[in-house]
């Protein structure tokens, strides 16, 4: 299953070749970062064929079943998080500890892929937004932390402090 992003009224994830999951990252060689059978690697985009299109909630379930997470990071100050259906692990690198939050997730089914989340204690709120539907470098999310291009933009507040960054999907 390769999940790929394309623009539509309700833009969801696309399945390719019944076996690959697109992880939201690509490079200059027209390769997509994909997941298959507990492995992560890059694969040429031109060998993939669409076989199905997931609804947003289905996509989140596929990620959960394969133990995949949204991985995000940003700078000034440098921070990162790992998010699945139930938990957010957030780390700010000028802090001495990682914070964990139990979360609720909401998917906006009307305006493309917008994944919203909030912690059950209301200390953390966030949005993961797909910004790059056609794999165009100029429309990708980039912080200079990688040579690759990411398709998700992230906004998160922790205790009222706003952090902005980019995200992909990974183990």
Image (cartoon, rainbow, N blue to C red):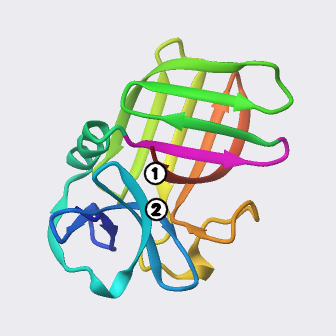
Mark 1 vs 2, N-terminal side: 2
In the image, which disc is placed on residue 99? none
Instruction: Decide whether residue 71 is among the magenta residues.
Output: yes
Identify the residue at image location x=44%, y=23%. 103
Front-lying residue, 158 or 77? 77
Drawn side of residue 151 relative to residue 95, left or right:
left
Q: Can residue 144 be seen in this view?
A: yes
Q: Is mark 1 on a helix, strand or loop?
A: strand
| Measured Cα–Cα span from mark 1 to mark 2 | 6 Å
Q: Is mark 2 on a helix, strand or loop?
A: strand
- Residue 126, x across and y down, in percent: 55, 37
Residue occupied by mark 2: 24
Q: Vertical placement of 79 versus 146: above or below? A: above
Pointers 1 and 2 in contact (C-beta within 8 Å)? yes
Q: Quadrant of residue 71?
A: top right
User: For the magenta stretch, what is the residue range?
Assistant: 68-77
Identify the residue at image location x=26%, y=80%. 48
- Residue 102, x across and y down, in percent: 46, 17
């Amino acid at each position: 299953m390769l999940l790929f992003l394309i623009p539509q009224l309700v833009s969801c994830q696309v399945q390719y070749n019944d076996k690959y999951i697109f992880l939201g990252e690509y490079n200059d060689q027209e390769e997509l970062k994909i997941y298959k059978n507990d492995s992560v690697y890059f694969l040429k985009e031109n060998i993939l064929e669409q076989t199905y299109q997931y609804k947003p909630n289905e996509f989140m379930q596929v990620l959960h079943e394969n133990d995949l997470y949204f991985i995000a990071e940003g700078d000034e100050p440098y921070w990162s998080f790992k998010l699945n259906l139930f938990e957010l692990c957030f780390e700010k690198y000028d802090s001495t500890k990682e914070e964990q939050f139990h979360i609720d997730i909401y998917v906006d089914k009307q305006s493309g892929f917008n994944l919203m989340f909030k912690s059950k204690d209301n200390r953390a709120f966030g949005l993961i937004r797909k910004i790059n539907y056609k794999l165009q470098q100029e429309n990708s999310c980039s912080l200079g932390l990688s040579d690759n291009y990411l398709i998700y933009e992230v906004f998160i507040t922790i205790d009222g402090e706003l952090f902005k960054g980019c995200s992909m999907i990974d183990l």
